[in-house]
Image: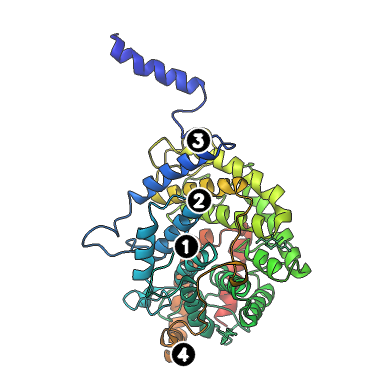
């Protein structure tokens, strides 16, 4: 064997004997090392984004419009935690291009969007406002875009079934219209809670409480064993009410469930699909949201930090094992060897958990409010009312309902079960079906 053939083989043995094959290097105690890992992941993720190239549509990710909102939210957090401004112009351009009539409901896509799709953009704008992400002159402020989403969604609150709630889909012809699900209600709840904290306007507070209370009367939010779709927004209400007991109970319960179910392996895992390696592009992103929202919880409800931060750190270390240096990441953060998968969406989750691991170096970090130095200007009237009320104009006949319900069941099985991701899968199936049958009564 010639030397040049032998050398790579020896190197592999050497690396394998260290237990890892060129995983991304990460020292969780070292700020520069975390920033470096995050920078590589941001680069890797953005190599799949083309909206900034000539002839392309800024902010658009093909076949998954909402993913753009999720990606920009992740990049805003990345900028905040690391100070790297590389992608700021791309973020601003993409978000402003997709703003629709100041409400992230662009008319060319509006006919197939669900409430949750629009919500992710709203949450991205809210994040930009809270973190003082630079704004563009002569363009709507970040917080006003979030208010635009709130203003278009609130009139969709539907009391014709189940005594309230947001439907998943906006249009009766979409599969999923008959379902009131956790992501849509949890999304508006979170946005309302954050707007309440940011603006100190009681209207948002009342809406947040109304959505929470309604959800608690349904299987979507079960306060006996604390299964729910979203783990962190109770923290904003806790902070806004200066430690209100109702919200503390919510945080405690949800955090316990999250720990038990999603950190059973010590490291964050998407239990629904990782074991079978069947996660879809949505599910690949969910660990990223959980990372950043848990980190927000640790900041605005500081008593949770000692529980949350070590979990984030362990998860970041686990992730590094799944990210081969300079390449896309796998999804099984708990496993030492690379799991063989590589998606842009897993890179987004990896980026998010690396960014979150920066929190320990930033004692001053916190989502801002108008009262504590946020510069994004409130506009309670933002958004177009015309986008708000589609379902009132289309009476639904029974035949449509049955058809939609049938399609929705497929959705539940194929996709939705994963999307309602903080629920234990067994719970999820039960509550989706329960919500489904309630909704079509
Ligand atoms: C609310 O959040 C701030 C950080 O933004 C924190 O300093 C404060 O302690 C929080 N309030 C409560 C009641 O934990
Ligand atoms: C509070 O928000 C509501 C709902 O958007 C709005 O109608 C009202 O004008 C706001 N109040 C203030 C003081 O900004």
**In this rendering, the label closer to the viewer, 1 or 3:** 1
Q: Quick one: SS at disc 4?
A: helix
Which of the two labelled residues, at mark 2 and mark 3, occupies the earlier sequence position?
3
Question: Residue 388 occupies which quadrant of the picture?
Answer: bottom left
Indicate whether 397 appears above or below 16. Answer: below
Q: Are marks 2 and 1 in contact (CB under 8 Å)?
A: no
Which of the two labelled residues, at mark 2 and mark 1, occupies the earlier sequence position?
1
On the image, numbered disc 4 is attached to which residue?
Answer: 392
On the image, numbered disc 2 is attached to which residue?
Answer: 352
Q: Nearer the viewer, residue 388 or 136?
A: 136
On the image, numbered disc 1 is attached to which residue?
Answer: 133
Label 3, residues with CA under 10 Å away: few <14, some 14-19, many ≥20: many
Q: Residue at x 55, y 34 (%)?
A: 27
Which of the two labelled residues, at mark 4 and mark 1, occupies the earlier sequence position?
1
Label 1, residues with CA under 10 Å away: few <14, some 14-19, many ≥20: many
- Residues under labels 2 and 3: Cα distance? 15 Å
- Residues under labels 2 and 1: Cα distance? 17 Å
- Residues under labels 4 and 2: Cα distance? 39 Å
Which of the two labelled residues, at mark 4 and mark 3, occupies the earlier sequence position?
3
Indicate whether 89 appears above or below 380. Answer: above
**In this rendering, the label closer to the viewer, 2 or 3:** 2
- Residues under labels 4 and 3: Cα distance? 51 Å
Q: Quick one: SS at disc 1?
A: loop
Ligand 1 within 8 angstroms of badge 3 C-beta:
no
Indicate whether 188 appears above or below 297. Answer: below
**In this rendering, the label closer to the viewer, 2 or 1:** 1
Q: Residue at x 40, y 18 (%)?
A: 11
Q: Nearer the viewer, residue 41 or 258?
A: 41
Q: Residue at x 52, y 48 (%)?
A: 355
């Amino acid at each position: 064997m010639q030397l040049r053939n032998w050398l790579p083989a020896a190197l592999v043995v050497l690396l394998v004997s260290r237990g890892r094959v060129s995983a991304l290097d990460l020292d969780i105690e070292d700020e520069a090392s975390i920033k470096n890992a995050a920078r590589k992941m941001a680069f890797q993720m953005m190599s799949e984004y083309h909206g900034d190239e000539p002839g392309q549509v800024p902010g658009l990710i093909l076949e998954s419009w909402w993913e753009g909102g999720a990606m920009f939210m992740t990049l805003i957090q990345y900028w905040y935690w690391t100070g790297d401004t590389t992608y700021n112009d791309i973020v601003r351009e993409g978000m402003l291009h997709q703003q629709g009539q100041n409400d992230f409901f662009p008319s060319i896509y509006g006919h197939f969007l669900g409430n949750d799709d629009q919500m992710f953009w709203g949450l991205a704008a809210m994040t930009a406002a809270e973190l003082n992400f630079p704004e563009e002159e002569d363009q709507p402020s970040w917080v006003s875009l979030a208010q635009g989403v709130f203003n278009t969604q609130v009139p969709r609150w539907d009391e014709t079934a189940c005594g309230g709630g947001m439907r998943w889909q906006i249009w009766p012809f979409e599969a999923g219209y008959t379902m009131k699900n956790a992501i849509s209600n949890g999304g508006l709840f979170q946005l309302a809670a954050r707007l309440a904290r940011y603006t100190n306007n009681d209207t948002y507070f009342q809406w947040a409480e109304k959505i929470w209370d309604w959800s608690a009367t349904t299987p979507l939010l079960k306060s006996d064993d604390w299964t729910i779709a979203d783990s962190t927004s109770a923290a904003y209400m806790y902070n806004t009410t200066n430690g209100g007991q109702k919200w503390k109970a919510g945080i405690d319960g949800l955090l316990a469930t999250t720990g038990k179910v999603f950190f059973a392996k010590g490291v964050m895992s998407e239990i629904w699909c990782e074991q079978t390696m069947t996660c879809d592009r949505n599910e690949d992103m969910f660990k990223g949201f959980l990372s950043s929202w848990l980190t927000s919880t640790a900041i605005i409800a500081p008593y949770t930090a000692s529980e949350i931060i070590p979990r984030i750190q362990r998860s970041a270390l686990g992730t590094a094992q799944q990210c081969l240096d300079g390449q896309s990441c796998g999804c099984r953060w708990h496993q030492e060897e690379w799991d063989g998968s590589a998606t842009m969406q897993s890179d987004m989750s990896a980026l998010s958990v690396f960014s979150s691991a920066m929190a320990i170096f930033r004692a001053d970090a916190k989502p801002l409010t108008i009262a504590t130095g946020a510069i994004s200007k409130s506009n309670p009237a933002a958004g177009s009312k015309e986008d708000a009320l589609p379902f009132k104009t289309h009476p639904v006949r029974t035949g449509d309902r049955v058809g939609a319900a049938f399609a929705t069941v497929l959705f539940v099985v194929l996709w939705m079960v994963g999307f309602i991701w903080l629920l234990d899968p067994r719970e999820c199936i039960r509550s989706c079906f329960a919500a489904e049958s309630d909704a079509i009564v």
